[in-house]
Amino acid sequence: MSDDSRPSPPAGPSTARTAAVIPAAGRGVRLGPGAPKALRALGGTPMLIHAVRAMAASRAVSLVVVVAPPDGAAEVKTLLDAHALPERTDFLVVPGGRSRQESVKLGLDALPPGHDIVLVHDAARPLVPVDTVDAVIEAVRDGAPAVVPALPLADTVKQVEPAGTPGEPEPVVATPERSLLRAVQTPQGFDRATLVRAHETVTGEVTDDAGMVEQLGLTVVAVPGHEEAFKVTRPLDLVLAEAVLARRRLNDGF
Ligand code: CTP
Ligand code: MG
């Protein structure tokens, strides 16, 4: 839930204005059959609405661009019209593409001038706390061209020689030192011009936007992420998300 009483970076005229692009055009194949993932309900409200509210909860964010399933832009627009956002926050809806990368690019193309900081946030991370959003924005304001929220790993990670057939044993080739690894979340924050340049020049598969900025040879910094910013990917993640919402409701006393 958004909590407007929390301290947020001031959004005065001297500070850069921030827009959030929310890629929400995926089907959610790993979640199983049903509506597109972003439109599935969490605590009775579509996941996408939670994600939009999570961005709008930051006082710095004045525009949210939702990248909808290619055939669902009108439905998403109706949905957003029906759910109140803070007065300071505008939104736009554009149809997405075949890959996440393409969807983010379509969202960036729709950004009007006047927003110098851009967040890219997965609709599939509906529960990210506003403090995490603000920490990312602050690090961009402090001069980093790209910022990722990141957490240390609980599991040890092994590099393997992938087996040709799923389920076959795979030889382990290396064990990277766990203390040097981080699991990366969203929102990722960018100097707008840098992100646009990355999307215009970097080709090939990447799994996050900051990875494209790394390919430009620029430094990406990590700030502390949050366990509630996890990505809803598989059915068990929905159970966890419902539990987090239930805990918040208890704590908020409603
Ligand atoms: N996404 C997108 N456009 C695509 C594919 C993905 O906007 N063509 C978005 C998803 O809607 C999601 C985010 O990128 O908010 C992260 O992707 P992921 O969690 O992989 O979602 P899906 O691709 O929908 O899920 P799956 O890979 O299980 O199909
Ligand atoms: Mg996917």
Image: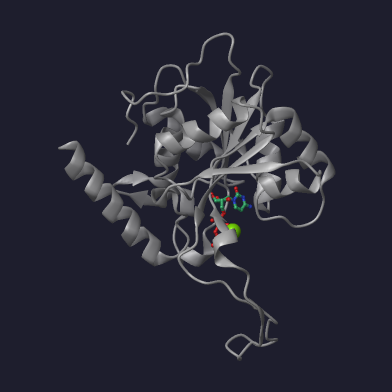
Quadrant including the N terminus: top left
Q: Residue at x 63, y 42 (%)?
A: 221
Q: Residue furthest bottom?
A: 168
Residue at (59%, 46%) from the top-left corner?
71
Q: How is the image coloured?
A: one colour
Pick the quarter of the image with the C terminus: top left
In the image, is residue 85 above or below residue 195?
above
| Residue at (36, 26) in percent of width and height | 84
Residue 54: percent from left, percent from top: 42, 36
Residue 247 is left or right of residue 11, and the answer is left
Q: In front here: 144 or 212?
A: 144
Residue 242 position, x and y percent, is 29, 54
Q: Nearer the viewer, residue 31 or 33?
A: 31
Q: At which x and y percent is residue 82?
A: 38, 30
On screen, residue 162 above or below 1: below
Q: Quadrant of ligand 1?
A: bottom right
Quadrant for residue 251, please give it: top left
> Relative to residue 3, is residue 233 depicted above or below?
below
Residue 241 occupies which quadrant of the picture?
A: bottom left
* Any part of residue 77 in sight: no
